[in-house]
Amino acid sequence: MSAQEKPNWQRNLYVLWVSVFLAGIAFSEFNPFLPLFISTLGHFSHRLLTFYSGIVYSATFIVSAATAPFWGKLADKKGRKPMILRSAAGMAVVIFLMGLVTSVWQLIALRAFQGLFAGLVSNSIALVATETPKAHSGKALGSLTASLTGGTLLGPLLGGTLASLFSYRMTFFITGVILASIFFIIAFFVHENDFHPVTEKKLNSVRGVLNELRAPRVIIGLLITTMIIQATNYSINPIVSLYVKDLMNGSHGVTFVSGLVSALPGLATMLVASRFGDLGDHIGTAKILMLGFVMATIFFTATAFVHHVWQLAVLRFLVGVSDATMLPQVQTLLTKNTPAKITGRIFSWNQSFQYLGNICGPLLGSVVSGTFGYSGVFLFSALLVVLNMVLFRQNVYRHQTK
């Protein structure tokens, strides 16, 4: 079957797979050198540089978490494709302008505007979720997760290479061009044929949206599940390189090994997310998610007791496998429990909860590591996973027949 003969949902999936992959690259390209770029914008003490770096990193997440529900409401009224185009165009301009800043406050303001234009990935997921037949939704959403993860893994490598070959500023310009290319790819090759605009005034409120749901408790439970999954994953970020340094006893190559260990979960997720999604379509999505909770609990607990860096690497890869059973499955369950006309709203809420987890996770990890040491962070993460499993079983699992 040629590309022209494939169903519209499959053509959209292929195009959005490429677009989300490029978006993953664009969003992560400047992560490796952002603090270094900030240091070129003034003369800062180490403490002040760390403070500004934290603000620059978190500004996008904070604004995105606050504004995502508004864009989700607009997506249900105007369509998911226009929201993807809005996001791609807005962030292309904003990130291009980051290459022209002359002060750290200008950079912070632009990072906040980047958050204002967020929604490219969430609306791509919502578009695929609404147009893909339910029997294939797990595999389709798993594929998008794999593409985003793959782009996110490649982004820092490409960004570091570009910064070394050219400059920090040129990397921002190139990233802006990548996002502009996504705009044109979506504009010409994605066709949203099954969209029906929402006009009911009752859906302008949160209560109205919840009243449209067959099982509001399930959706709320899934949103909380998303937040805890992200908090668990991100709680490790502040201490991974320090844990590697401790395990290597001051040996050379800590930076390289830390980068490798940090990349392994994403690599594992990219390799198996689609397969778990397909398996969930056949045996039950909720069952796959429960399996993921059990796996993550075991792997996080074991990580607290490693004595060699290769043991840490193996367990971080396995954590990536467990990740592949979680977020894509949550998205699939959201799809299966949400009417099409409010899918944009629900997925925007999910994005907000995801960003809340991104913000809270590193803060919790830093506090726990400062109090109980590096191993304590992994044990704390295991406890969070158990809590998540209990909440999921009470609020979601019992309501799912498949």
Image (cartoon, rainbow, N blue to C red):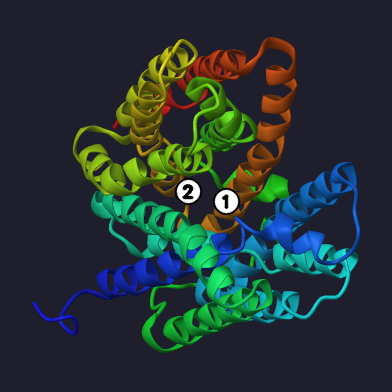
Q: How many marks?
A: 2
* Residue 236 visible in image: no
* Label 2 environment density (alpha carbons within 10 Å; few <14, some 14–19, many ≥20): many
Q: In the drawing, does residue 14 fall left or right of residue 198?
A: left
Instruction: Tell me what residue is drawn at x 18 percent, y 76 percent.
Output: 6
Residue 305's place in the image compared with 77, above or below, is: above
Horizontal relation, residue 21 to residue 36: left or right: left
Q: Which residue is mark 1?
A: 346
Inspect this view and state whether residue 369 appears.
Answer: yes
Q: Tag 1: residue type? A: Ile
Check whether the beta carbons of the residues at disc 2 and disc 1 lie within 8 A of each other.
yes
Q: As drawn, which residue projects farthest toward the left?
A: 1
Question: In the picture, residue 402 is in which quadrant?
Answer: top left
Observer-nearest residue: 149 or 251?
A: 251
How far apart are labels 2 and 1 at the CA level? Answer: 8 Å
- Occupied quadrant, residue 111: bottom right
- Image position, residue 59 (x, y; %): 78, 55
What mark, if any, has residue 281 been given in the picture?
A: none
Which of these two is toward me, 142 or 224? 142
17 or 224: which is nearer to us?
17
- Locate the N terminus and report the quarter of the image it occupies: bottom left
At numbered mark 1, what does the secondary structure look like: helix, strand or loop?
Answer: helix
Which one is nearer the viewer's eye here, 108 or 185?
A: 108
User: What residue is pinned by disc 2?
Assistant: 338
Residue 366: x and y, percent? 71, 27
